[in-house]
Amino acid sequence: MNKKTLAFPYVFWAAAFIVIPLCMVFYYGMTDKTGAFTLSNIITIATAEHSKALLLSLELSFVSTVICFILAYPLAMMLTNMHVSTHSFIVLIFILPMWMNFLLRTLAWQTLLEKTGVINNVLAFLHLPALDIINTPGAIILGMVYNFLPFMVLPIYNALCKIDGNVINAARDLGANGIQTFLRITLPLSLPGIISGITMVFIPALTTFVISTLLGGSKILLIGNVIEQEFTQTGNWHLGSGLSIVLMIFIIVNMVVEAVFDREGEGNKL
Amino acid sequence: MKKTLRNFYIALIFLFLYAPIVTLIVLSFNASRSRAKWGGFTLKWYQSMFRNDAILQALSNTLLIAFLSALAATVIGTVACLSMQAMKRRHRAVIMGITNIPMLNADIVTGISLMLLFITLGLRFGFMTILLSHITFNIPYVILSVMPRMRQLNPSLYEAALDLGASHMQAFFKVVFPDILPGVLSGFLMAFTMSLDDFIITHFTKGPGVDTLSTKIYTEVKKGIKPEMYALSTLIFVTVLILLFLVNRPSAVKKETQTS
């Protein structure tokens, strides 16, 4: 049995279900209903309605990514400093919520955030001002941070775990103080983790339509909502594909950035 | 002091991550149908859940698709890893690049691309199309979890087994497989979990009349979620929790949960 022939099933699968479908998105995106070549589907992104959705998506996903990073980095550092034997336990704790359905978990935030919801009751009890963010972009950001935080924590945690403790000690021995050690040793060494964390938060946040539907009421449209509607309601696949091509430009930029930082090709993904 | 601060921060994050889950568990015991009101403790949703055919059907679809897609992805992915060992560097890089596409690409794009493919092929949207899609997005998780194990493997061992008279099959199952088993298992688990939790890709590749739990919940969102759904999710979550507890308890935690 030749080892190379073993590659056929997967190569066939990847071609049929990854490469060809992607080509079809490009085909549909660049043709009209008669099959003639056109760029109009892509250019519609410039219309007020679509560009507003895209800009809002970019803004919300950017803010969520930043918040995720700020929350995740210290957390990952703290977890790294804990016992080594708890490694798989830590990973588990972040994976475990996935066993509760993603839609229900997000929906639970409605109950928590509502005007008379749990959080506002607690705030009222503490005589703090009420939080009124349900059905606003704020709630969508919260939903994004909540759903994607593990994807930021785990790659950074993995990258930090890989850092040889001796390198840190050497820096300290050579007279670097805590901040210097962090800025010049820990941070650069954890960069691959940070980059893949950013990708894994930014892309799903940019393209989500579920979180905005569940937490943003029905008034806030993200680019994901627009595309989803084109496919499931309006039935204009050409336009939907055209807008997806625009989305893919952002994804490709992200992939290139990641490839530059992560030449090993192994990744620090989940 | 520093330690207290650290523990406080970690506790806050976990509160953030687990608050919605606790909320759902509490709601499953809520006698009131409304999400916003506490109407007293009840177990009636747990009873009516088992009489609700639509929910049970969605559950069995979900579990069946998760199991079958994880299994198929594990076989295809492991075989792919095996074959990539023998490949030229460049070819391997191309295949790994393609493997990364479903992971890096947005779910919505993967979903619509598969939808367009199935439309063009004239497939009837239903169980089969969901299964094919799930296998597709599960394979990368398996490959990324088996590949590092495969690389650590000493190729001479396999050759030694052949020299000593083992067939290729024997050499694989007796020498290579036990070594990559942890990677294969965690790849399978990862794939199973991902399939179970997927909504977006299923949303675009499902047909009318076939529902997984996710798509069923999504259609219920507008009319109001049936409390039975909370009961079922609680049951699933607690089952997994107990299983994990049992698995991790006997010896020190040795299972290498896949992270790279």
Image: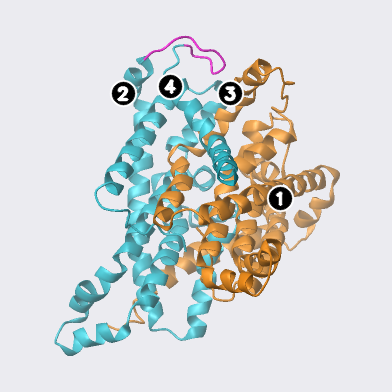
Q: How far apart are marks 4 and 3 (CA)?
A: 13 Å
Which of pointers 3 and 2 indicates the residue nearer the eye?
A: 3
How many other residues sit within 10 Å of disc 4, few (<14), some (14-19) or many (≥20)?
many
Q: Mark 3 points at which residue?
A: A111
B39 relative to B190, above or below: above
B105 relative to A62, above or below: below
Q: Is residue B192 left or right of residue A159?
A: left
- Helix, strand or loop under label 2: loop
- Chain containing the residue with disc 2: B
Amino acid type assigned to the residue bearing label 1 in the image: Val
Q: Which mark is residue B28?
A: 4
- First-in-chain label (1 vs 3): 1
Quadrant in the rendering for residue B178? bottom left
Which secondary structure type mostly characterizes the magenta part of the structure? loop
Q: Name the residue under label 1.
A: A66
Q: Is residue B260 left or right of residue B253?
A: right
Tell me, yes or no, whether the two marked residues, 4 and 3, touch with CB atoms within 8 Å.
no
- Chain containing the residue with disc 1: A
Chain depicted in cyan? B
Chain depicted in orange? A
- Residue closer to the observer: A46 or A191: A191
Instruction: Tell me if residue A34 can be seen.
Output: no
Tell me, yes or no, whether the two marked residues, 3 and 2, touch with CB atoms within 8 Å.
no
Amino acid type assigned to the residue bearing label 4 in the image: Ser
- Residue at image position (54%, 72%) is B97
Amino acid type assigned to the residue bearing label 2 in the image: Phe
Amino acid type assigned to the residue bearing label 3 in the image: Thr
